[in-house]
Structures are given as structure tokens and as C-alpha cells.
Amino acid sequence: MSKQKKRVVAAMFLLVFAVALVFSSVFIISHAHHNCTEDHCETCVALHICQNLLQNLAGGLKAAAIFAAPLLLLCALLLGSERLFYGKSLIINKIRLNI
Ligand SMILES: [Zn+2]
């Protein structure tokens, strides 16, 4: 898969994620004071589906944060150590000695 297609797929996933998050939240907020009078209420079923969706998305974000945080910290440490060790060389600073 080319880089452009990966970006499009990632953008589509992000869009679906954002739409699901926003519309589920709006539905729950708009039906917060729902008075249920039926045994098999479709509104209550939809509310439970939205609630489960938000909980699953939050769980996924939590898991992603747990796995991404050490990785980002490791990358920051590696980049920092690279600059610490290699940032002061004559070649990187483009200083010529044979003038
Ligand atoms: Zn109901």
C-alpha cells in the first residue's frame, strides 16, 4: 500500500472515529431525560449502544495511550541522546579544518 493510500485510510478511520464519538455523545445528551414507558424501548437500546461505543472507544484510547507513552518517551530519549552525543561534532556543525 502506498504512502498516500495509508494516509487516506488513516484519515478515514479518524473521521469515522470522530463522527461516532460526536454523534453518540449528542444522542446521549439529547436523550438524557428519557422517560421509559415501554418494555422494549428502542431509545433505551440506542442509548445502551451509544454508551457501549463510547466506553469501547475510551478503552481503546486508554490502551493506545498506555502503549504509546513509553514508545514516545523512548523516542524522545533517543533523539535527545543523539543530539547530546553527536550534536557537538565538527562534521555536524559543518566546520572545515582544511582551509
Ligand atoms: Zn426507554
Image (spheres, helix red, strand yellow):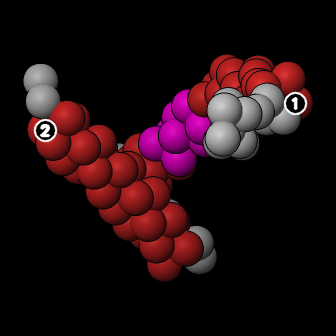
Q: Is residue 85 left or right of residue 98?
A: right
Q: Which residues are magenta?
A: 52-61
Q: Secondary structure at mark 2?
A: helix
Q: Residue at x 87, y 30 (%)?
A: 84
Which numbered disc covers residue 98?
Answer: none
Q: Is residue 82 above or below residue 13?
A: above
Q: Residue at x 50, y 65 (%)?
A: 25
Q: Is residue 54 above or below residue 22?
A: above
| Percent coordinates x, y for residue 36 in the rendering | 49, 64
The answer to whether one can see residue 49 in this image is: yes
Q: Quadrant of the C terminus?
A: top right
| Percent coordinates x, y for residue 11 in the rendering | 28, 51
Q: Nearer the viewer, residue 30 or 39?
A: 30
Q: Can you identify the residue that label 1 sits on?
A: 84
Which amino acid type corresponds to the residue marked 2 in the rendered image?
Answer: Lys
Query: Between disc 2 and disc 1, whose residue precedes?
Result: 2
Q: Can you identify the residue that label 2 sits on?
A: 5
Q: Residue at x 79, y 29 (%)?
A: 89
The answer to whether one can see residue 43 in this image is: no
Q: Secondary structure at mark 1?
A: helix
